[in-house]
Image (cartoon, rainbow, N blue to C red):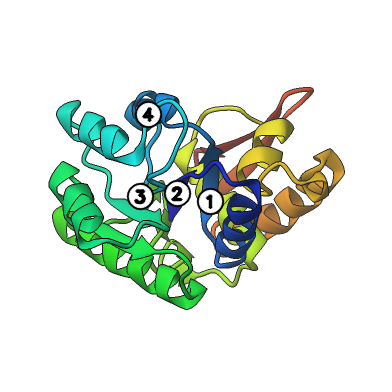
């Protein structure tokens, strides 16, 4: 799943991003509520993880603004505020679920899976497709021409991001940000290595589903003609 995390506490956001990436999710981070609705309108997310106590706009205002602007991305509120009134207020503002901090990480993942199933129900298959490639963001699986790919967590995140950006140039900096969360381990050399891994696995399953290198710029997922 591609997730937007809105959390201003650096310790909490670091913990969540690390755990979510290990569970094969793509995660973008915002530390303020002010940019959420703008980003959610131009980027495609499977869910938004939203804190309540944020600078600029609080989580209630953010959620209300999203729904008023027609953004129907599922919202899972994660907050230390545990009163019934807060939970009711969040749901009335348009949130889909509410999880009180501190929480068990396994419960967070389970709630994300539930949101993913509901999203698939609304949007039929819920699959991301490009040519012969099909990505299931809820199950974290990928197939090429019906053949299941065996991918590591990092390889899966990389392929999902490329499918979402199919036929567009993806730079190494973008891969470092979206696949590795900006960590130094996602530097250009490591990105090149992982692109090579995924490219070979795609090519073995289907010779025309290729990741192309755009010299000096980055990579592009583009299906070649037979």
Q: Residue at x 46, y 71 (%)?
A: 103
Q: CA distance from mark 4 to mark 2?
A: 20 Å
Label 4 to label 1: alpha-carbon separation: 24 Å
Question: CB of mark 4 within 8 Å of CB of mark 1?
Answer: no
State the SS at label 2.
Answer: strand
Residue 8 image offset from top left, x and y in percent: 55, 41
Q: Residue at horizontal 81%, vertical 51%?
A: 193
Q: Which residue corresponds to mark 1?
A: 26
Say whether residue 56 is left or right of residue 26.
left
Residue on which disc 4 sits: 57
- Front-most of 199 and 13? 13
| Mark number, residue 46 | 3
Instruction: Name the residue located 32 percent from the left edge and 56 percent from the top edge.
Output: 127
Q: Earlier in the sequence, mark 2 or mark 1?
A: 2
Marks 2 and 3 in Cβ contact (< 8 Å): yes
Label pair 1/3, CB-CB below 8 angstroms: no
């Amino acid at each position: 799943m591609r997730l937007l995390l809105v959390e201003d506490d650096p310790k909490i956001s670091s913990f969540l991003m690390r755990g979510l990436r290990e569970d094969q999710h793509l995660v973008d981070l915002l530390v303020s509520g002010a940019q959420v609705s703008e980003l959610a309108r131009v980027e495609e997310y499977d869910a938004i993880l939203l804190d309540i106590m944020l600078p600029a706009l609080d989580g209630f205002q953010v959620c209300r603004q999203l729904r008023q602007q027609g953004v129907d991305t599922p919202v899972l509120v994660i907050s230390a505020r545990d009163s019934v009134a807060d939970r009711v207020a969040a749901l009335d503002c348009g949130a889909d679920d509410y999880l009180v901090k501190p929480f068990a990480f396994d419960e967070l993942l389970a709630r994300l899976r539930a949101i993913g199933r509901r999203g698939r129900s609304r949007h039929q298959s819920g699959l991301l497709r490009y040519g012969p490639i099909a990505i299931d963001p809820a199950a974290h699986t990928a197939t090429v021409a019906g053949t299941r790919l065996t991918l590591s967590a990092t390889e899966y995140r990389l392929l999902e991001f490329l499918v979402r950006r199919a036929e567009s140039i993806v730079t190494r900096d973008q891969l470092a940000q979206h696949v590795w969360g900006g960590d130094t381990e996602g530097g250009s050399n490591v990105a090149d290595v992982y692109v090579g891994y995924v490219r070979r696995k795609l090519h073995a399953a289907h010779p025309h589903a290729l990741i192309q290198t755009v010299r000096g710029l980055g990579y592009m997922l583009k299906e070649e003609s037979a």
